[in-house]
Amino acid sequence: MRNQYKLKQILWISLFFLLVFTPIGVLIAGPAPSSSRSVWLDFSVGLGFVGLALMAVQFALTARIKWLKEPFGSDLIYHFHRQISIAAFFLILAHPISLFILDARYLRLLNIFSAPWRARAGVFSVILLILVVISSEYRKKMKIPYDLWKFWHGILTTLVVATALLHIFLVGNYVSLPLTRMIWIVYSVSFIALLSYTRIIYPLKLMRNPYEVIALNEERGDSWTIRLRSTKGRSLPFQPGQFAWITAWKTPFSDSEHPFSISSSAERPEEIALTIKDLGKFTSTIKQMQPGQKIYVDGAHGSFSIDRYPAAQKLVFIAGGIGITPIMSMLRSMADRGDKRPVKLFYNNRDWDSVTFREEIAAIEKKIDLQVIYTLEIPPQAWDGEQGYLTEDIIRKYLPLNWIGQQTEIFMCGPQIMMEIVERQCQNLGFNDKHIHYELFNFV
């Protein structure tokens, strides 16, 4: 299965480079610049072309196309999206700056009141792009609510690409040949198609298959489990450990969805469960949900799953707090499947009363080859288990030497700082990066 994903990764990476560098390739292969046109000008245009192509491709990366994200996983895709967007920003910004270096007279085009429309479109595109980057990089510091940011992020990025394309066609010099004109027409049509799919077609698809709340259960650790079922009687095939985006109280057109791990067994796809801790504005409303309430579910997504590594002989799960939810899906699925592989679960919590699913985990211990190691920051009296945070010494204590190697896969989910520390600890023990898997949900 790993080879299958690697093949898909190579395919999509190759397609990515083809889409990004085709415009500049055509520019290079086209007619040589006339004596009146500087090579530096073509270089400047090439920078803008690559930057714009990178921006346009971002719509495909964030469109939640499952077969596109499947080989990489959502965490990697969104991380790549952020890094490539920054690269696109600097490439696009380098386009006008290099023109100003070439000829200071280009500075006059910054005057949007007197400049021709082709220049105005370019200036507007750059200004909007700067707003996108600043609002994205400093959203938390500027205290911009996520829903508000996401709404305007979509609008602004659309306007960035649209005005940049308008700038290219109004300038006209680099779309005068049939081939170059056709390439940018194809890019424009593809951009409109992706935008239509993301903003109209896909939300309509979700609305045709609403889910309803069939039960709401309070869990330990100030968490709640909502159980959902399709009103159309459809199942939601998923791999244990994957997550879904849900929209509650609003429609899928509202851009108000939130990602949560599925905590139920993958062997029972006709009904899914999401266990959510009260941590913020939206999560605090979960306990107010009522049976029969409509929920829109976009899933399943993510590569954090034991099903992607069927050759693994031993499994290590590491959870912190509510990070147990995707791991709980794996444990429940293993119990339903009668999976005989040995499992060690390291589960860190603040105190014993905060241990979500502790009774069910004890029941699963009797069904599969599972050993649970709890670490409590504030243990109760007479506690004979591990205390404090999960450390390298604790992991080493419970992992025999024959567990350290390529036959073991590690899955961890919890607070980001915890996972960063534990990842280094596992590396120190001798585990290779490719055998350590995690879920962050740090998309923004």
Image: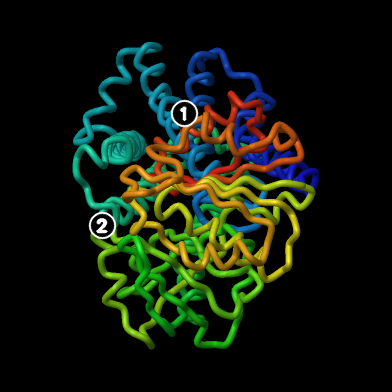
Is 331 rendered above or below residue 293? above
Q: Amino acid at mark 2?
A: Gly
Q: Is residue 134 left or right of residue 268?
A: left
Q: Residue 181's quadrant in the figure?
A: top right
Where does residue 255 sit, x and y in percent of width and height? Answer: 35, 62
Residue furthest toward the front?
382
Residue that mark 2 sits on = 280
The numbered mark, 2 or 1, whose residue comes first in the sequence reads: 1
Q: Nearer the viewer, mark 2 or mark 1?
A: 2
Residue that mark 1 sits on = 87
Residue 130 visible in the displayed image? yes
Task: Choose between 342 and 121: the one closer to the eye.
Answer: 342
- Disc 1 crowd rating (10 Å Cα; few below 14, some 14-19, many 20+) is some
Q: Amino acid at mark 1?
A: Ala
What residue do we see at 29% from left, 52% from top? 146
Q: Is residue 272 left or right of residue 430?
A: left
What residue do we see at 52% from left, 46% from top? 346
